[in-house]
Amino acid sequence: MLRLAGLGALAAGASGCGLLAGTPQPQLLASAAPLPSPYAVPLPIPEVAKPVRTTGAVDYYELDERAAEAEVLPGLRTPIWGYGGTFPGPTIEARSGRPIVVKLVNRLGEPTVLHLHGGHTPAESDGFPTDLVAPGAAREYAYPLRQRAATLWYHDHRMDRTGPQVWRGLAGMFLVRDEEEAALPLPGGERDLPLLICDRSFAADGTLLYPGLEGRPGVREAYMGGVLGDVILVNGAPWPELRVARARYRLRLCNASNARTYELATGGPMIQIGTDGGLLAAPRTVKAIRLAPGERADVVVDFSAYELGRRVELRNLAGEGAQGRVMRFAVDRDEADDSAVPARLATVEALDPGRAAVTRDFEFSSGGLHGGTGWLINGRPFDPRRMEARPKLGDVEVWRLTSDVAHPVHLHLDQFQVVSVNGERRSGPPEWKDTVELRDAQTVEIVTRFTDYRGRYVLHCHNLEHEDMAMMAAFEVV
């Protein structure tokens, strides 16, 4: 099923697709269905998953992958693939240090792989792209959750098919909480909002459009740089609206798009309190948040700054026209609010790059620079049998990432900290990340420490079309 020989077919196909003439950029896939009016539907809030049982200190969950239909565009039915038959899947809430086990049951007609994005996870449960769950089969994933509070997400991670399978709906939010965060007076309850943001395109009958190739990995020539949808969805709804009180809200922003980068802004100040890896040491006031595919950020917006009846748009400054809109908040009531954003949020350990045992180089580039063989790391397409690095458990390492065009780079197993961008040392307090945006012709140095678990993991581009077309590298912690 994996058809590792398909990498050769990919190479042959890519070499005939004009890569040598220039490096492909993400392209918009236009819908045939009329685009719905913005702010005409309410924001859905995915249900919170409940354990099917608890044994000792371990909670057990079950995720049922199955085909279903959803009314994404008003008046049309869209076939989806969903965890629990919904898009997004249910939100899983867990506590740091309290293990959970998720049983994935595949009721689809294709193999799948479950990956907890941002999870500090043993190799056998991380979702290595060839660890397939066949149709009709099930697999248990163990998450010890030896990590700090953070906004994570889960999604399909099947080799060669992550793009189309996530596009169909296989994604959901995963929130880790801990005592340090619980002691803070941050907004909670209904004012703690997971917002999974993505873009999709639709045929005239409401079905999802995707420019995949028949019988082999990748997409049609025009979309080799990445697929952009023309409908922006938040929690599975197109340009939704949420009625809010004049109070503080915590927005957990997750970019679940295949290839689209967002610059999210409300037109007023937002207070950023967290990144991929959890809370910052201290809050910072920002005008916009830039999120490449796979990245997350937690922000607090104080709607008490707006009068009753005000409509506040969350816009995408990186988009034009309809793609410049995301969702809207309607300020419609007064409510008591005892939340606050304290000046100090969390303790964030700083990793010292001077203690690195080794510095490794990873070049992300198109096959046009290497004989037309697709999207490559260090000049080679992904081979799950080849280890590009073998870091030692407990070691600190610096990884130098370079790009031709933009690539959001995601590291499995451990979070990292950004050391420098284009040789300029990063300033300010340390912060934890698991995905970093490499912009065009850029070099970013990250420092990480490999802890707790040995085994095979991957580093890859989180532009899902790039990932499916071989921009991934395996490494083994020894």
Image (cartoon, rainbow, N blue to C red):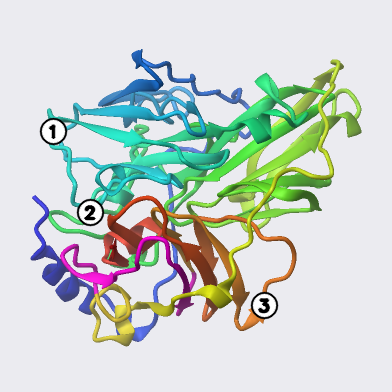
- Label 3 packing within 10 angstroms: few (<14), some (14-19), many (20+): few
Which is more toward the observer, 90 or 74? 90
For badge 2, the amino acid type reads Met
Q: Which residue is mark 3?
A: 425
Q: Secondary structure at mark 3?
A: strand
**Label 3 vs 1, first from the N-terminus:** 1
Which is more toward the observer, 111 or 183? 183
Which is more toward the observer, 424 or 300? 424
**What separation in Å lies between label 3 and label 1 (alpha carbons)?**
48 Å
468 relative to 342, above or below: below
- Label 2 packing within 10 angstroms: few (<14), some (14-19), many (20+): many
Task: Identify the image quadrant of the C terminus.
Answer: bottom left
The location of residue 389, given as percent across then percent down, is: 30, 72
Q: Residue at x 53, y 74 (%)?
A: 355
For badge 3, the amino acid type reads Arg
**Label 3 vs 2, first from the N-terminus:** 2
Residue 304 picture quarter: top right
Q: Which residue is mark 2?
A: 159
**Stretch of the chain drawn in magenta:** 381-406
Q: Residue at x 40, y 30 (%)?
A: 99
Q: Which mark is residue 135?
A: 1
For badge 1, the amino acid type reads Pro
